[in-house]
Image: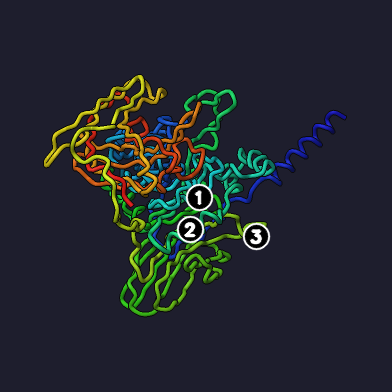
Amino acid sequence: MRRLVLIVVLVAAAAAIYVALPPPARILPPAAGLAAPVRGAIHVHTNRSDGSGSMDDVAAAAGKAGLRFVIVTDHGDATRPPEPPSYRSGVLVIDAVEISTWSGHVVALGLPRAPYPLAGDGRDVIEDIARLGGFSIAAHPANDKAETRWTEWTAPFNGLEWLNGDSEWRDEPPSLLARTLVAYPFRPVESISLMLDRNDMVMSRWDELAKRRKVVAVAAADAHARVGLPSAPDPSNRRGLLHVPSYETMFRAFSIALPDASLVNDAEQDARAVVDAIRGGRVFSSVDAVAPRPAFTFTAASGSNRASAGESLALDGPVQLHVRVQAPPDAQIALFRNGTRALNVGGTQLMYEAGAEPAVYRVEVALPGPHGLAAAPWIVSNPIYVGRPPVDPPPPAFRPPANEKADIYVDGSAGQWTVEHSTTAQAALDVARAVGGSQLLLRYALSGTPSSSPFAALVLPASSLLAQHDRVTFSAQADHPMRISMQLRVPRNGREAQRWQRSVYVDTTPREVSVFFDDMTPVTRTGPRHPPLSDVGSLLFVVDTVNTKVGTSGQLFLDNVRYER
């Protein structure tokens, strides 16, 4: 009897596993003249932050998965110098960074060492990345974790992740997660595909942005090769970790491909080629767990003009669009025009003739499975921008010039200006001589620990004039590149004061800056969105550890400070 029960249990378990298993990856036909692209993975974490393996481990896994390059993006503030590109296990390893902001996380490629911590408002971090010559990618915009999900859609970031490997499982029901866990030991790569879907919000946001400017989309691995257990709540703690899904599994599940790039085994040169291709949008994504490593081309012509995905096509008559893909005959090719599906055809090619008018075109390819089309597209291209240059970045929002002003400081003594600082910081206020007059000088030094939040600030009591204006304008200069936080403070009896802030960049060259009150955000993330101007008690220029490292000292000069409207 016991033997019979055991047999029944084993048969039932085998049947459950069989039902849970996803179908094996499709076998692709020959490429038929299509060149194999250079394929790699982007957004990967090592044990320098919250991943489980070393850079060598990552490279070895990428090589086993058939990838040519991998872009490592450990968490940081960009003040750590990136490691030079290198070949490891035959795979090109490019060092980048993932930065935490108040608006979510952003991946920065091609970034040198930053002169100060990049953090704070997402708009400011995007601005800093651009100033330093980097390429910004809004990370996991569909993540269920609010603190990491990108939310600042008005910022001029360069790219976004239409798919993110670490986000996909977070919104799945327990039944699907259980099925994935059952299937993983038997078909690990295909089991990942069970959790992948097409996030309509992200795709719609991308399409809307692409109508106005160039935005490059990628499928990001966000690979950690770890799952923390309750006994190891600290992400940096290597104890109590399950190393699943493995790096190799994630690298086999989906990847990005560069159809026009070529690598010559020179790490510096090849890294430039990879990053330049991504910057240019000459990249497509594929879910290789459905069918591995397809070749794909998307081109357009207008008269004698030609363009590929990521490029702009000048109009010279009607537009012909051509898609070719290494796919089974039951593939479904969808052409999108300005975010709307314009054509859907079956097979391995799509031909479409459009009028001679500006538009943005991109392609998605889907493969049917046992239960219809897969939830996530198999291939996603980047757009071809027809009839207009892909403007990057967008112009700043128009603000009317001021026609009224009220001076706060122009030469002379410091008057009501004072300094404030934390117990582990030092600050002093001087009036320094300048060409044609004088200016305020804040000398500061931050010490202690980051957890003690040291700060130094120039402070001025606000008057009734503030509420009669819409901005503060000032000239600022520092002895080194830095960010300062211009703040408004509202006192509250017996409770911590409320503050609103806007960060601005300053360096050794004097520059005039205007901070609009309606552009300031709450420091505490509570209270009204905009400062109640009639209640403001103080105006502050703050140096703190959001953008200044502990142990830093320096000088900040302010001049021609005034309210305007």
Residue depicted at 52% across the width and 62% down the height? 365
Residue 163 numbered tag: 1
For the N terminus, give its image quadrant. top right
Q: Is residue 124 left or right of residue 22?
A: left
Question: Which of label 3 and label 2 is nearer to you?
Answer: 2
Distance from disc 2 to disc 1, alpha carbons, whole Å, reads 10 Å
Front position in the image: 206 or 48: 206
Asked if the residue under mark 1 is in contact with the one under mark 2, i.e. CB atoms within 8 Å, the reply is: yes
Residue depicted at 42% across the width and 70% down the height? 359
Relative height, residue 342 to residue 209 (above, below): below
Q: Which residue is identified by label 3?
A: 372
Asked if the residue under mark 3 is in contact with the one under mark 1, i.e. CB atoms within 8 Å, the reply is: no
> What is the crowding at mark 1: few (fewer than 14 residues within 10 Å), some, or many (at least 20)?
many
Most extreme residue toward the front is 464
Residue depicted at 56% across the width and 45% down the height? 168
Q: Amino acid at mark 1?
A: Leu
Q: Amino acid at mark 2?
A: Val
Q: Give the structural element (helix, strand or loop) at label 2.
A: strand
Residue 64 visible (yes or no): no
Say how the picture is coloured. rainbow
Residue 380 numbered tag: 2
- Answer with mark 2 or mark 1, whichever residue precedes in sequence: 1
Residue 190: x and y in percent read: 58, 47
Residue depicted at 47% across the width and 67% down the height? 338
